[in-house]
Amino acid sequence: MASVELQNVSKRFGDFEVVRDVDLSVRHGEFVVFVGPSGCGKSTLLRMICGLEPISGGKVMIGGKPMRGVPPAKRGVAMVFQSYALYPHKTVAQNMAFSLLMQGMAKAERDKRVAAVAETLQLKHLLNRLPKELSGGQRQRVAIGRAIVRQPEVFLFDEPLSNLDAELRVQMRLELAKLHRALGATMIYVTHDQTEAMTLADRIVVLRDGVIEQTGTPSEIYDAPKNRFVAGFMGSPKMSFLEATVRETNGKKVLLDIAGTSGGRIELDVEEPARLSPQVIVGLRPEHFFPRVPMGPRLAVDIEFVERLGGENYLHAPGHAAGELVIRHAGDEGPAAVRGPAEIAVDWTKAHLFTADGSAVARRPAQQPRQ
């Protein structure tokens, strides 16, 4: 397996630049996920690594070797597409072995590789079937197996699970995670599904408009987003954003006014209070609300809709004066609130703070009580 290095990579179609000056290092054996909204350039970036899309500027390195002018078949990569792209008239075994046949590999070695991969992917009993006789999940495993038998240095996945139903996606996520551990392979995976990104990735690359907004581990991306876009994109349901006014700063503390609050002042510890403008944005994730904890500054809300999911529920208050709220209500907290007015407590130590232009403001760690 090998590392992948992108140095100032860009892609233009005429005057339109879809990928701009991307710098990224993917370490040997790492599982990196590209995530972002539709049209952000994540699939284009993957295709440039593979060689299916020529780059307009910069450099792609695989295993320390520059790839400019190297055709896809010579790059030591294997790509799994959203479409299974299986030959309908060939059996599972023939589909998996086809690239090896084109390389001129002897039949005995082809059969050996196919049998080993089929065992890993639990396809051994399906080797003589045609694609039309397989389920969606089985077809996707065949497509992945076709990539594995080539023993590439880098695996590239372009939204491989998007055609599967919800249950199969969960199953295949587990299969991919186990496969990565078993192979120790370098994998780059494209998805718009943040659940896939959070559960599969060693590191996540969040893209917007062809630019990397943030790179980090799933916990870094979720707990310490660098801007409002990343904070709002990663997380389901998404983060709630409340408009706030800076009342005063005192050392490393900032006091805020938020419409519709009661029960005391909102006080946050920040690293650089001097950079705050009078108007800021407070970000709160659904799990940072506590519907039954009557302490500290609280938010007066009007619950308009309750999303009941069994073990937990989400309370929606789109009409709050400071901004739309989505509040997690754990199933063990008693019956979910009915529609109507309520007071919601908040763990303000977990709040995120953003400037008016969307940049994150570094929070100071909450003081731990003395023992």
Image: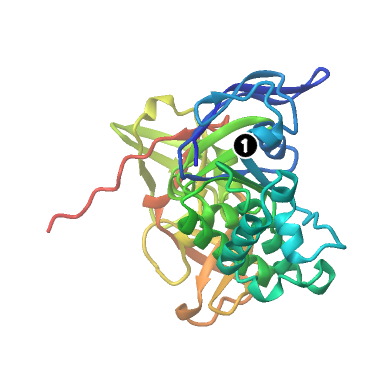
Number of numbered discs overlaid on the protein picture: 1
Residue 252, quarter of the rendered image: top left
Q: Is residue 286 visible?
A: no
Q: Position of residue 353 (x, y in %)?
A: 46, 40
Q: Secondary structure at mark 1?
A: strand
Identified at 45% across, 45% down, the residue is 217
Residue tagged 1:
207
Q: Nearer the viewer, residue 157 or 190?
A: 157
Q: Position of residue 286 (x, y in %)?
A: 52, 60
Q: Position of residue 20 (x, y in %)?
A: 66, 23
Q: Is residue 98 visible?
A: yes
Amino acid type of disc 1? Leu
Identified at 44% across, 48% down, the residue is 223
Q: Nearer the viewer, residue 75 or 280?
A: 75
Q: Would you say 72 lies left or right of 335 here? A: right
Tell me: residue 193, above or below residue 220: below
Residue ranking furthest to the right:
89
The quadrant of the image that shows the C terminus is bottom left
Residue 337, quarter of the rendered image: bottom right
Q: Nearer the viewer, residue 284 or 106?
A: 106
Q: Position of residue 361 (x, y in %)?
A: 44, 34
Tell me: residue 234, above or below residue 289: above
Dot 1, how many residues are within 10 Å of its Cα: few (below 14), some (14-19), or many (20+)?
Answer: many
Q: Nearer the viewer, residue 5 or 236?
A: 5
Identified at 80% across, 57% down, the residue is 86
Residue 305, quarter of the rendered image: bottom right
